[in-house]
Amino acid sequence: MNTLPPEIIETLKKFLEEDVRSGDITTNVTIPVEKTALATVYAREKAVLAGIKEAEAIAYLTGLTYEVLAFEGNWVNSGDPVIRLRGSARTLLTVERLILNIIQRMSGIATKTYRMVSIAREVNPKVKIACTRKTTPGFRFFEKRAVVIGGGDPHRYSLDDMVLIKNNHITAVGGVHAAVSSAKDAVSFSKKISCEVRTLQEAQEAIGAGANIVLLDNFSPKDVGGVVEVLKSKGMRGNVILEVSGGINEENVREYARNEIDVISSGSLTHSYNAMDFNMRLSLN
Amino acid sequence: MNTLPPEIIETLKKFLEEDVRSGDITTNVTIPVEKTALATVYAREKAVLAGIKEAEAIAYLTGLTYEVLAFEGNWVNSGDPVIRLRGSARTLLTVERLILNIIQRMSGIATKTYRMVSIAREVNPKVKIACTRKTTPGFRFFEKRAVVIGGGDPHRYSLDDMVLIKNNHITAVGGVHAAVSSAKDAVSFSKKISCEVRTLQEAQEAIGAGANIVLLDNFSPKDVGGVVEVLKSKGMRGNVILEVSGGINEENVREYARNEIDVISSGSLTHSYNAMDFNMRLSLN
Amino acid sequence: MNTLPPEIIETLKKFLEEDVRSGDITTNVTIPVEKTALATVYAREKAVLAGIKEAEAIAYLTGLTYEVLAFEGNWVNSGDPVIRLRGSARTLLTVERLILNIIQRMSGIATKTYRMVSIAREVNPKVKIACTRKTTPGFRFFEKRAVVIGGGDPHRYSLDDMVLIKNNHITAVGGVHAAVSSAKDAVSFSKKISCEVRTLQEAQEAIGAGANIVLLDNFSPKDVGGVVEVLKSKGMRGNVILEVSGGINEENVREYARNEIDVISSGSLTHSYNAMDFNMRLSLN
Amino acid sequence: MNTLPPEIIETLKKFLEEDVRSGDITTNVTIPVEKTALATVYAREKAVLAGIKEAEAIAYLTGLTYEVLAFEGNWVNSGDPVIRLRGSARTLLTVERLILNIIQRMSGIATKTYRMVSIAREVNPKVKIACTRKTTPGFRFFEKRAVVIGGGDPHRYSLDDMVLIKNNHITAVGGVHAAVSSAKDAVSFSKKISCEVRTLQEAQEAIGAGANIVLLDNFSPKDVGGVVEVLKSKGMRGNVILEVSGGINEENVREYARNEIDVISSGSLTHSYNAMDFNMRLSLN
Amino acid sequence: MNTLPPEIIETLKKFLEEDVRSGDITTNVTIPVEKTALATVYAREKAVLAGIKEAEAIAYLTGLTYEVLAFEGNWVNSGDPVIRLRGSARTLLTVERLILNIIQRMSGIATKTYRMVSIAREVNPKVKIACTRKTTPGFRFFEKRAVVIGGGDPHRYSLDDMVLIKNNHITAVGGVHAAVSSAKDAVSFSKKISCEVRTLQEAQEAIGAGANIVLLDNFSPKDVGGVVEVLKSKGMRGNVILEVSGGINEENVREYARNEIDVISSGSLTHSYNAMDFNMRLSLN
Amino acid sequence: MNTLPPEIIETLKKFLEEDVRSGDITTNVTIPVEKTALATVYAREKAVLAGIKEAEAIAYLTGLTYEVLAFEGNWVNSGDPVIRLRGSARTLLTVERLILNIIQRMSGIATKTYRMVSIAREVNPKVKIACTRKTTPGFRFFEKRAVVIGGGDPHRYSLDDMVLIKNNHITAVGGVHAAVSSAKDAVSFSKKISCEVRTLQEAQEAIGAGANIVLLDNFSPKDVGGVVEVLKSKGMRGNVILEVSGGINEENVREYARNEIDVISSGSLTHSYNAMDFNMRLSLN
C-alpha cells in the first residue's frame, strides 16, 4: 500500500472533511450516484512534481483506483498527465480540489527548492539546502516532504527533534559555552546540538563546547568565508557542521554557497512559494 | 474571551502539538522552569495586520497574558509592536514560532487582498474581491479569515456551503438550464445557486433557470463587458450576481473591475502569497 | 462505495464505540468466533424508509456484506424486509441495535415529514416543508437527511450556513433595515440573508433592505395571508422567499399552506417524533 | 466545578462545534464583540426539569457565568426561569440553541419517565421503570441521565455493562441453562447476568442456572402474574430480579406493575418522546 | 475479520502513530519501497501466549497478511513461532516493535496470572483470581484481556462498571449499612454492589444491607477463615460473593485460597510483571 | 502553569476518560456533590519519586488545588507525603486511582534506573544508562520521562528521531558501509546515525562510513573491551559514541561499564519494572 505514515493518513482524512463537511451539495444534485468516470491530473506549467503519494492515499481512502503517470521529483511540463483516477464520478468531483491543492503546493515548494539547490551546487556540489520550521501550521509534513522531493533537507521536524540554541537561550544560561555544555549534559545522546552564533568568537566557543552544528545567522557571504578560514586554520572545521541562514534566497544563495559550508537554510522555501498550476480533467462514462 | 469558533480553538491546539510534540528540548535544558519573560511581536515590513486573534487564543490556551498593540486590518510599519505577551519564559519560547507562522501568513494574505481590493475599487467602488477553495489543506479557516481582514470576500467555505455548478456537472445533467433547474429543485431554499458559464448564451440560460450567481470563467475583460451589456439590454442583469474568475491578478484586475460586475474571485489570494516578516523579541525577567 | 461524507463515516464509528465500548460481553461468551449468520431487518409498521445508507456504511465498516431490499424514501409495510446483512454472527449481533436505532429514528422523521408535506401540498403544490436547528445534538446530519428523504427541506445546517437575523440581532443593530443592510455588507455574497419579522412593516423593511428570505414568525394563517396580499400589491413579493414558522404542525399546516408562501418550517419534525418499529431477525448458519 | 464526566465535557464541545462550525455569521455581523448581555432560560410548559448540569458545563466552557434557578428533577411551570447566564452577547446567542436543544429533550424524557414511574408506583411502590439501549446514537449519556432524573433506572449503558442473553444467544448455545451457565463461567464475577425468557419453563431454567435477572419479554400482564406465582410457590422468587418488557407504555404499565416484579423496561422512554418547550430571553446590556 | 472492539482498533492506530510519527527514517533510507518480506515472531522463553489478536489487527490495519501459528492462552516454548506476517518489508520493520511490545507485555501478564491461578486452584478449584484497576493508563484493555487469557477475572473495567464502596465512601455516608443501602437505592438494578470491609462486623452489615460482593481487604488468611466460618454459621454465606485482597502474591495466595472464598484480587498481576521475551526474524524476498 | 507538552495534557484527559467513562457510580451515590476534602499521597516504600508533574496536571484539569511536598528525582521513604490535593471530594476520589497508577509506575522506573545508573557510575562516572523503545504502547512519554528523572537517557523517542541501522537494514543494503553511507546521504543533517554491529570489523566499517554512534549488540563485556582497545589504537575512538546493549541488567551492568564506553542501553528499564507502593489518604471536610 502507501508509504505515508499512519498519522498522515489520518490528517488527509481531516483535510477531506474540511472541504466536504456535510456533503458536496452540487455534485449530489447533478451527478447520478451510479455514474463512474475517469479523471486525469495534468501539469499546466513546468514544475518539479510532488504530492503524488498524497493523491494516491486520498484515492485509496475514497475507494478510487489510480495509475501514477509521472514520478515525484521529476520535471513535468505543461500538458503532462501525472496521475489518473477511476471510480465514482461523485467521488472524483468531491476529491478534485483537495488533490489539486496538495499537488500544487507541494510541487511549488519542490520546484523552488530544486532551483535553489541547483544554483548552490553549481559552486558547491555538496552543500545542502534546508528549510526551517516556518511552515504552514498543520501542513508541515507535506511542506517538509516537498523540500526533500526537490532535493533539499527537511531540517528538524519539531522542537523535540534537535537542540537548537538561539540567542534567548544563550542569554538565559549566560553564554555560548555554558549553553552548549549544559545541553550536552542534559539531553539524550541521540540528539544533535546546534548553536546559533553571531560572531566568530561565539562560533569557536560553540565548537569548543562540543556543538555538532554551528549556525552562522545573518552573516554576510564574506564574513562566512572569514569564519571558515579561521576555523580551518585552527583545526576546528573538521568535526562540525557549518550552517548559514538569514535572508538567503535565489539571488544571493550562490555567494553563500561558494564558502566551505555544509548547509544553507532558508525559511522562504516554505513560507513564500507559488503554487504550480495543475488541473483535473474528467470524462464521465 | 475569544471570538474564534470552538473548533478553531481545537485546531490551534493541534498546531501547537505539531510543533512541540514531546517537548521543546532546547528550552527545557536552558531556561529555568520558574523564569518569566515579556515578549513583543514586531512587524519588520509594512503590512496589513492579521492573525492577532489567533495569537491571543494561543496565549490564553498556554496561560500567558497579553496586550494587543495594533488592530487586525490596519496597516503596520516595520518596527511597530503588534502584541505583547507575558508569562513563563519557557512557554513564550515554545509558542513563538507558531504565533509568528500564523501572523506572517495571515498578514501576507490580508496585505495581498487589500492591494487587490484597492486597485479594483478605484474603478468600481462596489466590487468584491473573493478568494476560492484553493487554500492550504487544514488552514482554510485562517486563510479565509485573512482575506476578510484584508477587505475581501471569503466565498463558500466548503462543498456544502453553496451550489456551484461547473462544467462537469453541466455535462452530466445535459445543459446549463437543466443543471440549474435540477439544483433549484433539489437543494435547500437556504442555499444560493451559482453557475459557471463559458458563453453569453450559457449566462442567459443560467439566469433564466434562476441562478443566483453567474460565474463568467476565463472571459477576457472585454468579453465580460459584452456579456454585461447584453444582459442589461435584456433586463436580465438585475437579479443576478455577476462573478468573474480565471487568471485574475493585481496586473489585470483593474481591467476586469471596470465592468459592471459584482465579484472578482482569485485563487492566487490564498495559493501564492508571501509571508510578511514579523519577529518576536523576548526580555527575560 | 458509500455516498455519506467522510466526517459522517467517522461519526458512525463513534456511535458504534458508544454501544460496544470494551466489547459485547454477552455475544463473546455465547457465540463462537467462527460462526456466521444472515440477518434481515424488517419493518414492523408502515413507514417512509430512511437510514439504509447508514446501515450500509456500518456493515461496510464492520466487514459485513449486505443487500438493500427497499429504498429510502419509499413506503414500507409491516413485514417488509429492508436490508439483509451477512457475515460474522458476533458482528451482526453487535451492530444490531445501532442499525435499528438509526433506521427507526430516521424513518420516524421521514414519515412525519412526508405526512406534513402531503397535507401542505394538497393546497399548495410548491410549498416546501423545512426543519430547523432543533435537532438532537450530535445527530443533526441524520435528522436533516431524514427530513430530505421524507420530501422536506433541511434548512440551514449550522450557524455558518446562512444569515438568519432574529429579534435580538435586530434590537442590537437598531432595526430591521439596519440589520439586513449591515449583514449584506459584511457577509459573503455566497450566503443568503433571512430576516425574522414580527409585523408587515418589518417584512417590507427587510425586503427593501435586500433580504433574500423573510421569515414570518408566529403569525396566524390569516395574518400571513394579509402580508402576502400587501406585498403582492406593492410588487414586493417577486424576489423574496417567504417562510412561515411558529407552532406549525400537522393540524394547522394546511391553513398556513393555503397562502402563497414558499416555505413552512417546523421544529417538531426533529424534536418530537416517534421512532418507527423495525426489528432484525438472525439465522445462524 | 461540574460533575459531568470528562468524556461528556468533550462531547458537549463537539455538540457546540456541530452547530457553530466556522462561526455564527449572523451574530458576528450584528452584535459588537464587546457587548454583554444577560440571558434567562424559561419553561414554557409544565415539565420535570433536566439538562441543567449540561447548560452549566456549556456556560463554563464558553466563559459565561450562570445562576441555577430551578433544580433538575423538580417540576417547573410555564413561565418559570430555570437558569440565568451572563457574559458576551455573541457567546450567549451562539450557545442558545444547543442549551435549549439539550434541556428540551432531557426534560421531555424526564417528564415522560416521571409520569410512567408515578403510574406504576401507585400499584407497586418499589417497582423500577428502566429505559433500554434504544437511545439516539451519540446522545445516550444524556438520555439515560434524563431517565434517572425522572426517577427511572438507566439499565445497562452499553454492551459491556451486563450480560443480557437474548434468543439468538440461547439458540447458538443450545438452551437457556447452557447459555446462562456458560456466561456465568466466562464473564467476570463483577457483572450481573440477565436472561430474556419466553416461557415459564425458561424462566425456571434461567434461575436454576444462576441468572441474576430474568427478563420476561412480551408476556401479557396476566402471564407475568402466572410466572410470579409459580416462582414463589417453588421458592425461586427470592434471589432473582424479575424484569418485564415488550410494548409497555403509559396505558398498560399499571397492569404490569400490579404483579410482584422488580423492573419494567420500556424503549419508548428514549425512542419516542416529545421535547418540552423552553426558550431563552436575552437582554443586551 | 477481527474480534477486537472498534474503539480498540482506533487505539492500536494511535499506538502505531506514537512509534512512527513522521516516518521510520531508517527503513525509508535503507529498504526499497517495493521490497517484500516474511517475518516470524518467535517465543524466546516459556510463556502463556497473549496479544496475537492485537498482532493480527495491526497486520490488517497496515496491509500485511498473516498466519497464526500458536493460540492465545496456550503455553509456548523458546523457539516456537507464534505468528507469521507477509508483505512490504518497510511495513514489517515499522510495525515490528509495536507488535513485540504488545505480545511481550500481554504474555507476561497472562503467564503471571496463569501461575497464580494454578497455585490457588490446587487448593480451591473454583476460586477466581482477579486483577484490579491498577493498570497502565491507556493500556487497561490489553492488560485486562491478558489476565483473562491467563485464566483470571478482569474485575470491573472502570468506575462506572460496578459499585465498589471503600472506606472513604463509608465514612462519608456514616457506616457500612447506610452506604450499601443508599447505593442499592440509587444505582441501576443492572449493577452489582461490592463493599470493602475491615471487620467481621462490617461484613455482616454489608451482607445484611444486600451487598452482592463483600471484599475483605487486608485480612490475614486466618482471619479470612474466621469470617467465612461465622458467615456460614449464620447462614449468610450463601448469597454473597466473598473476595479477598491486599498484598496477595504467588507466595501467599495458597494460604488465602484454602478458605471458602470466591475471588482473590491482586493488583500485582498488572502493576508489576515482567515482559516475556519474543523476537521477530525477517527474511527479505 | 504546567510544563508538560500540550499533547501530553490531552493524553492525561484520555487516561481519565478510560477510568471514569460514564461516571464514578460509587462516589456519585455516596458522596454529596458539595462535599470538599483534602487528600495526601504518601510513599509506602523507599523510592525515587516521579510522576508529580502528571499529578499536578490532573489536579489542574479537574479543578483541584495542590501543594507539592517532595521533588521528582529525590528519594522518598515510606510514610513521606509527596503531594497534597484539595477540592471536591467526588473529584478527589475519582482521580485517585489514575494519579496513583502514574506515580507508582513512574517511580518504579525512576528507582530502577537510578540503581542501574549508580552501579554503572561507580566504575565509569560518565557512562549513560539509556532505555529503548520497549515501552508500554501509549505510555512511552511517561516511561521515558521517568528514566530521565532516575538519571537515565531517554534514547530516541520514536522511529523518526534518529537513524538506527539494524541487521535487516544492513542485509537489505548489502553491508555496513553501504548502509551508513546511504543513510548519511539521504537523511537530514539534523539527525544522528547509529549503526548496530556484530563484529569489530563492522564497528570499524561503521565508523569509517561516518556513523555518529556504534551500537555493540550482544557482545560480552570482555569483547566490548577488545573493540574499545582496537578502536583506540587505530585512532577511531574519538569521534564516535560507543553504545552497548543486549541482556544488560543490574547484575552485569558493572562489567560492561568498566569499559570505555559512552552508553549502556537496557530494555528492562521500561519493560519489566515493579510499581512502587504509594497510597492516597483522604479527609473529608
Image: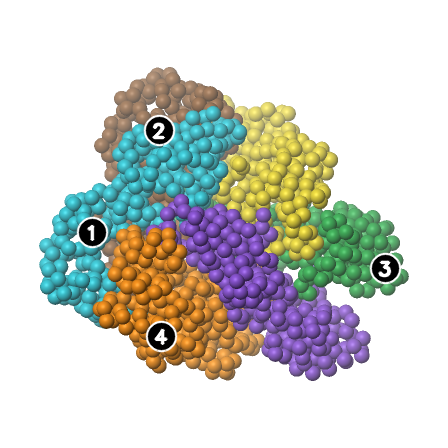
Chain colours: A purple, B orange, C cyan, D brown, E yellow, F green
Disc 1: which residue: C127
Tell whether D263 sits left or right of F254: left
Which is closer to the viewer, label 4 or label 1? 4
For label 4, the SS is helix
Residues B160 and B184: in front is: B184
Cα–Cα gap, marks 4 and 1: 42 Å
Q: Which amino acid does the dot numbered 2 rest on?
A: Glu
| Tag 3 near tag 4, CB within 8 Å | no
| Tag 1 near tag 3, CB within 8 Å | no
For label 3, the SS is helix
**Image quarter of residue B212:** bottom left
Which is closer to the viewer, label 1 or label 3? 1
Residue F174 percent across, percent down from the top left = 77, 51
Which residue is located at x 17 percent, y 55 percent? C261
Which is closer to the viewer, label 4 or label 2? 4
Cα–Cα gap, marks 1 and 3: 89 Å
Mark yes or no: residue B223 visible: yes
Tell whether E181 sits left or right of C265: right
Q: Which mark is residue F231?
A: 3
Mark yes or no: residue F101 visible: no
Which residue is located at x 57 percent, y 61 percent? A50
| Tag 2 near tag 3, CB within 8 Å | no
Q: Which mark is residue B222?
A: 4
Crowding around mark 2 (Cα neighbors within 10 Å: few <14, some 14 to 19, many 20+) is: many
Asked if marks 4 and 1 fall on the same chain, the answer is no
Q: Which amino acid does the dot numbered 3 rest on?
A: Leu
Q: Which amino acid does the dot numbered 4 rest on?
A: Lys
Disc 2: which residue: D243
